[in-house]
Amino acid sequence: MSNIFSDNNQIGVVSTFSELINTNFQGEMNAICWNRNLNGDFKEIVSQLHLKENITEVSIEDLLSLQLSENGNIAREIILNDLQLLTDFGASPSLNLLKNYERDEELDFISTDVYSFHVDRSTIGTNTFLCTYHGAASDIISNNEVEQKILIPEIREKLKELHNGSEAEFETFLKEYYFDLHYQPKPNAKPINLGLGHLWKLAVDHPEQEVLPCVHRAPVENDGEYRLLLIC
């Protein structure tokens, strides 16, 4: 399939949900895109939803209660179908209306919030699925274009000062506070924006994973615009 992601070794491109769940990661490929050009007015849905907190989970009942135009209804049917497909697959999808995520401003030399490039970790074999229907979309980046933040000497030294314990305990400390999940882009690195409407499967760090986990980040939101994001 010819599209903007096809010539990237990190990304596999498929054209159906069945292919998305049945295509395995391999080699450098740790992100798979169900490439879609969606019809429908997702902005209309966002304009009618009510933000209760900075991140508000939208239920199926919330969606069904909206009075929508024909194009709004097309968008709603797409979202409901995506939720159903993932639920039938055995995932637990969540539809979120997002103003912004919480920022980590506790330490000035390392950030561990979702705006920082990071990987997801699980104790069981799983994947991260996500689709942005409206608003700014997430980024991924190739593993060879990033450096683990805990391996950057000046950051590592400051973390050791913060820990103030033995070397063996230090490694546990790094995992316990998720410092080891975060990455710094190398100079001239080129993040890839995941775009709107595509449903993505990203590799997670877990014991059975045979590829490197996918490094990704949440985008800085556009001014005055909420994001509508499916994630599980």
Image (tube, rainbow, N blue to C red):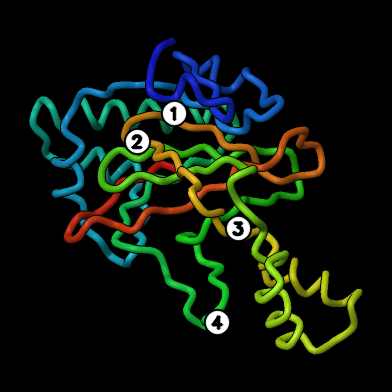
Tell me, for residue 107, which label it has, or none.
4
Mark pair 3, 4: CA separation: 15 Å
**Sequence-first tag of 3 and 1:** 1
Q: Nearer the viewer, residue 20 or 194?
A: 194
Of tags 2 and 3, the one toward the viewer is 3
Mark pair 3, 1: CA separation: 34 Å
Q: Quadrant of residue 125?
A: top right
The amino acid type, in three-letter code, at marker 1 is: Gln
Mark pair 4, 1: CA separation: 40 Å
Mark pair 2, 1: CA separation: 22 Å
**Sequence-first tag of 2 and 3:** 3
**Looking at the figure, which quarter contains the N terminus?**
top left
The amino acid type, in three-letter code, at marker 4 is: Leu
**Sequence-first tag of 3 and 4:** 4
Extreme residue toward the front, this view: 188
Say if 93 sits above or below 152 in the image.
above
Tell me, for residue 195, which label it has, or none.
2
Mark pair 4, 2: CA separation: 31 Å
Residue under the point 55% across and 15% down: 19
Residue, disc 3: 183
Residue, disc 1: 84
- Crowdedness near tag 3: few (<14), some (14–19) or many (≥20) residues, C-alpha within 10 Å: many
Do the residues under discs 4 and 1 have CB atoms within 8 angstroms?
Answer: no
Do the residues under discs 3 and 4 have CB atoms within 8 angstroms?
Answer: no
Q: Nearer the viewer, residue 6 or 88?
A: 6
Residue under the point 54% across and 32% down: 201
